[in-house]
Image (cartoon, coloured by chain):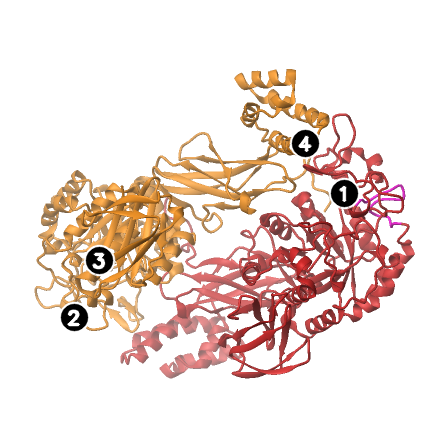
Chain colours: A red, B orange
Amino acid sequence: MPVPEGRQPPARILIERPQPSVDCGRYPAKACVGDEVPVSADVFRDGHEVLRAVVRYHGPADKTWSEAALAPYDADVGGNGFEGSFLVDRQGRWSFAFEAWADAFGSWRTEITRKLDANQEDLTSELLEGKAIVEAVAARAKGEDEDRLNAVLAEWTLDEAISVDVAQAAARWPDRSLGTRSEVLEIEVDRVRARYGAWYELFPRSWGGLEGTAAVVPQLAALGFDVLYLPPIHPIGVKNRKGRNNAVSATPGDPGSPWAIGSPEGGHDAIHPELGTEADFDALVKTCREHDMDLALDFAIQCSADHPWLTEHPEWFSQRPDGTLKYAENPPKKYQDIYNVNWDTEDWRGLWQALLEIVQHWVRKGVRVFRVDNPHTKPFAFWEWLIAEIRAEEPDVVFLAEAFTKAAVMRALAKVGFSQSYTYFTWKYSRHELIEYMVELTTSGMQDYYRPNFFANTPDILTEQLQHGGPPAFHARLVLAATLSPSYGIYSGYERFEHVPVKPGSEEYLDSEKYEAKARRLDGPLLPVVHKLNMMRRAHPALQHLANVRFLGTENDQLIAYVKRHGADTVITVVNLDPVLVQEGIADVPYESGLPPAYEVRDGLTGERFTWYVGRNYVRLSPGGAHVLEVL
Amino acid sequence: MPVPEGRQPPARILIERPQPSVDCGRYPAKACVGDEVPVSADVFRDGHEVLRAVVRYHGPADKTWSEAALAPYDADVGGNGFEGSFLVDRQGRWSFAFEAWADAFGSWRTEITRKLDANQEDLTSELLEGKAIVEAVAARAKGEDEDRLNAVLAEWTLDEAISVDVAQAAARWPDRSLGTRSEVLEIEVDRVRARYGAWYELFPRSWGGLEGTAAVVPQLAALGFDVLYLPPIHPIGVKNRKGRNNAVSATPGDPGSPWAIGSPEGGHDAIHPELGTEADFDALVKTCREHDMDLALDFAIQCSADHPWLTEHPEWFSQRPDGTLKYAENPPKKYQDIYNVNWDTEDWRGLWQALLEIVQHWVRKGVRVFRVDNPHTKPFAFWEWLIAEIRAEEPDVVFLAEAFTKAAVMRALAKVGFSQSYTYFTWKYSRHELIEYMVELTTSGMQDYYRPNFFANTPDILTEQLQHGGPPAFHARLVLAATLSPSYGIYSGYERFEHVPVKPGSEEYLDSEKYEAKARRLDGPLLPVVHKLNMMRRAHPALQHLANVRFLGTENDQLIAYVKRHGADTVITVVNLDPVLVQEGIADVPYESGLPPAYEVRDGLTGERFTWYVGRNYVRLSPGGAHVLEVL
């Protein structure tokens, strides 16, 4: 290959490791409205030229690119990193790229300054070179800068040449014609609810249907909840209906599982008549809106044996050789009350369209949050398309992925568009596991696209820890969930310390609300603590972000402690993971925390005030107890 | 966006994290002829289908793609990884990609096996489904497999259906029509010398010129050296020649620095008359070849004040405003004997071409290795082009980058094509630093493209450790270099423990050979150890690779120990980093080493034999002493 073509030699600056980047730019990173998105890249070339870099960015429908300056941040330790940020002030798809160029004047100034510092006497030649450079700058400059630079050129003394204001003027008129640009990367910007919110899950049939649910919304709002999440509200199949405690057959009066969707009364776009009417639903939506709460529905792509689609669209389901449709299985388990759609059906396009229309139906009825049941058994490409379609029509919609499966699959769901995701949090019991997992969530790259929702329990998950730990365990886990993750949730029953499994070794509740209605009220003993935590979360931006966490030494493995900072807002949390014994230890607040040597803190859970210090602070906590300290 | 077009739904399998991959495929990874290149990727989709994956690959000039099967390797810990390898048996650019598909028969077989294990009785439907799948397989199959499958179909019993040989037959005829392929990645395959070799650096003028150098080649070969590296052998400038100990001016008789290239007698394509003639050079090349040694020349893109190019092509150099050419500077340092080319010259294409022709000149005279001086002050794009050009003509050529600069720059030089690179090794003194650096080189991703050369000293680098540690330090550093890195080297003088700096705090040698000739012979006291190490390296493939190292606990920070394995070949090294005191400790050989509970070892340095064990082995070493134990 002969020498490359072109009047100019190929670009000399390399831009590497652009961040944030997900799978080499295949997927957008995530941010929320109001975020200053931190960006960085390594920028370097041969030789010693001074380099400048900017991030160029634009939001949806912007006609031009904006820019923000980047600054070197690790040069003192031999790095080539440049970092900066830009504000994303509205929802939608943003684009950004890096641009870097050699700063001729900056390089000249650096060189001549070094020579001056070394007392080199004859700088005639250097001054002449600098003059040529400044002449080029002056030719580009306008306004006051142009005047200033021309004035300097007229006299052209060393002192003037290296003066700060000449340097600043020159910096405003760079020659970027030989610069280098990186590839364009993208960021999907959501409303803040996609990152931050307190969730409460309840089964309407245990609260007096949709009307009873609407009646409890004001109390939930007062408790500080942001999202009310309902398991499916659709008609429930009769054939093969499950009975209490997952009995294979229902006895008369058993309501069945809400996830066995569909009956002659309708499918995914209908409301279970026993829960109420369309008007009741509209009223619930209205009540939530009036109390600044989001209503989240459950989107479960599966059908009961009575779902209209089984007769209207049998081709959307898997058939046995004898022509009958196949119910769901995870061998050897059988779910006779559930039929999964067949994604390989020839009419996959009709199926996809029908599912889209289901979601659109509820969006048009005012729903802006969907908790998606088991998305990992549905194609990634389907979610990527559906989520994009829905958000193109209504950018406020938030999708929560409920997938407890292999890590790569959970991550892929987040990459293809899920706004937030359940996690392995419920099974991280010990200090070591919790820190290891949080470090993964906040530093492995997941922090760029995977927003966790730390539900402390779900109708399917009553962990061993909660079964045996009693109220102290419930208290500790609640504090962890609410302070470690911007989004967290509880399923009703948690606040009453419900802890009995259907049998030893199982994570299923005894007399699970999945299979029977209960008589529920919002009066559990843990609610005052929930309220305090939700109020602290609202008051402290530090608790509304994920990656701003730093774990502290405690000198006791039963204690976990961490500091979260956002700007000047600081919250320090200490939790006793032992549900049985009092534990003592310390919280070692590091100097890098930026706190003064002594500072006042107030425990949001008790109102107590302490003086804390940088360094080791003695702590003593009851079983499952915690400090959640706001630095005053 | 309406539902995606197409008869088939979009691909369901995701292939992530393909390895090896350098900067998202922008650069090829590296391997050597004869390597089984390990590859891996995460492969997964929605649901529970069994997936199969292969790596497709082809070498230069191959007309078709070959394939190698991949196997899951981390499923038991919740991973989706598939790994495998393929043999690269010749030099040049290889391509590879991953392909994965759902295995319908394997999925069916897994499901029905689970149902059998759970004693499910009625499997009529499952059997019918399986029959349909096997019918499809039989339609694709040929030969014995076709017969076998048709025979099974004729009877179609459960036992036959799930038999191993039917499973194997089905696996040989997969339906890959709905599979997914990853992007294509590349590997640049070199000859083995690019990875592995022992280097000896000498200044010919201290050995009797080129003729004297040729005379010492047999002895170097007997010592086990693979590469003889010479600083520049070109005419040296007279004007502004440096004197002894880098004096600004030379006194008569001072030979000057070999890197001040060029005189009226010629430039980069000429031989210094005092070193010998073209015939002497040809004889040296021949002697090296006869002794299976590579001759490495120094390629330094810079010119003395007398280089012909300054008058023939002044446009290739930077000019001062007064028209004079600028000598090299790194302010405030001045290098009046050196002129750097100006890469921004309008005739950059003429400059690049001239530099290419220099390298081509020496390649055509039989040189196959170039140690490149300070490549980091020359454009990356230039190196990427030049290296590719040279290797297209002569794939055997190896380029060693001598760049001691920021890490990102050193890595970028390797990415754009340098076959191997100097490293920070000389400045890694302590156990902690050595392990940290080796972990970076072998696990950060650098192992895919950055081949280290652990020179223990160079004419520019006499470290504090060597200045103060005496012969024990020289011994320890030699063992480290020769056993940690497949490529290592010493500069003559090392084996004589030369350790006096020009002044305290400097890394320059007193009376540096850069500025004066010496009277050298190959009789340094350390040479017997060099010989032993080189012979062990030749005998043990474990020492010819980089990333196959595992560090062992020693219970003493003055001791560093590591095991290297390649297949069944195992070498365990222990080094006392203390140059003053005897040190005791252990070498804790882990169970994962794969060694039996007790095994015989022989110390290649002393011939002593020991019985060693899995677990803790007592060691006691003299200052700077070492064990290099081959497991028998």
Which type of secondary structure does the marked residue at label 2 adopt? Answer: loop
Q: Residue at x 48, y 64 (%)?
A: A176
Q: Which range is magenta?
A: A260-272
Q: Name the residue under label 1.
A: A302
Q: Mark 4 points at which residue?
A: B119
Closer mark to the observer between disc 4 and disc 1: 4
Q: Which amino acid does label 1 sit on?
A: Gln
Depth order, front residue of A311/B556: B556
C-alpha distance separating marks 3 and 4: 66 Å
**Mark 3 vs 2: CB contact within 8 A:** no
**Chain to which mark 1 belongs:** A
On the rendered structure, is B235 left or right of A431? left
Closer mark to the observer between disc 1 and disc 2: 1
The C terminus of chain A lies in quadrant: bottom right
On the rendered structure, is B355 left or right of A179? left
C-alpha distance separating marks 3 and 2: 38 Å
Q: Which amino acid does label 2 sit on?
A: Ala
C-alpha distance separating marks 4 and 2: 91 Å
The image shows residue B52, relative to residue B611, as above or below, that is above
C-alpha distance separating marks 1 and 3: 70 Å
The N terminus of chain A lies in quadrant: top left
Q: Earlier in the sequence, mark 3 or mark 2?
A: 2
**Chain to which mark 3 belongs:** B
Rendered image: mark on residue B247: 2
Q: Which of marks 3 and 4 is nearer the N terminus?
A: 4
